[in-house]
Image: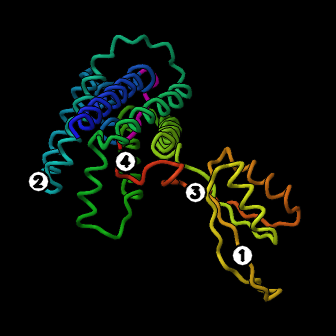
Amino acid sequence: MKKEKISRFLSDTFFLLIGGVLFGASVNLFFLPGEIILGGVTGIATTVNIITGIPIGFLIVIINFPILLLGLIFLGGGFILRALIGVAVTGIASDILVFLPMTVSDPLLCAILGGLTMGVGCGLMFSRDYTTGGTDIIVWLIRRRVRRLSTGVLITIIDATVVLCSALTLGNTEGIFYSAIALYFFTVSLDYVLTGSERGKLAFIFSEKNEEICSLISKRLHRGVSLLQGKGWYSSREKWVVVCAVRKNEARTLASIVEGEDPSAFVIFTEVSEIRGLGFGGLGTKKEKNSV
């Protein structure tokens, strides 16, 4: 038990530090040179830094302080402690890594590379239940009072407000376009880090050769299969439907197995955002998951 706790602590620390470094690198290498405003607390800090020159990491910590205090009052200490650690790490990393050379200044490249880098960094931190404070805490506090708006809508409203106000303050309205690009790539990379390895496809296979197909899937793909009882509406015949979850790179092999055994089979593939369980990963007890 003690070894598991030590291993968990070392693993959390490693991902936290790597995530913080990537966060700081994205700020200094891409967002500041391109004057890209991502939204949230980081966007506010970036805007103030461009105007005043105050270190961005220091601003991130200072702006987050009252937000974390409110979170401590209404959300409890356990969550806020991890948020405080995440804010401290990203703030310190952003100020320490100011020595990194600014090799890219094109706004489009800065938006793409910055969004990707920060998304990966935040994803690594979120995967260990650390957050960067800011927007997510504000959203949870608002949703305690206003249930009609979804979390995604609230985050979009807050980030859009920050981007718009920053663009008007800096007199750079075309920056809104680059901010939107950065936010898109941030979301894509963040989502991939958090759920990319668990994404897959769910196949529904309609065939008269169910047993043969199930046997081949088990032997060649080493995946479990289930049989659901169905009934054809047109034929009124009862039949078995083969259901199988596979990783994305296994979908083509599955299709070839079915086609090779029964060319007349009917197969439906659906996207699955996450697959957990035997052969895919833990159900959440060993691998927890949790804005800028």
- The reply, left or right, for residue 19 in relation to residue 193 is left
Residue position for label 2? 73
* Secondary structure, magenta segment, majority class: loop
- Mark 1 vs 3, N-terminal side: 1
Q: Quadrant of the C terminus?
A: top left
Asked if marks 3 and 2 touch (Cβ < 8 Å), the reply is: no
- Mark 4 vs 2, N-terminal side: 2
Please tell me how crowded label 1 is: few (under 14), some (14-19), or many (20+) other residues with Cα within 10 Å.
Answer: some
Please determine whether, in this image, residue 128 is positioned above or below residue 240: above
Residue position for label 1? 240
Residue 139 visible from this viewpoint:
yes
Q: Amino acid at mark 3?
A: Val
Residue position for label 4? 289
Please tell me how crowded label 2 is: few (under 14), some (14-19), or many (20+) other residues with Cα within 10 Å.
Answer: few
Residue 167 visible from this viewpoint:
no
Q: Which mark is residue 272?
A: 3
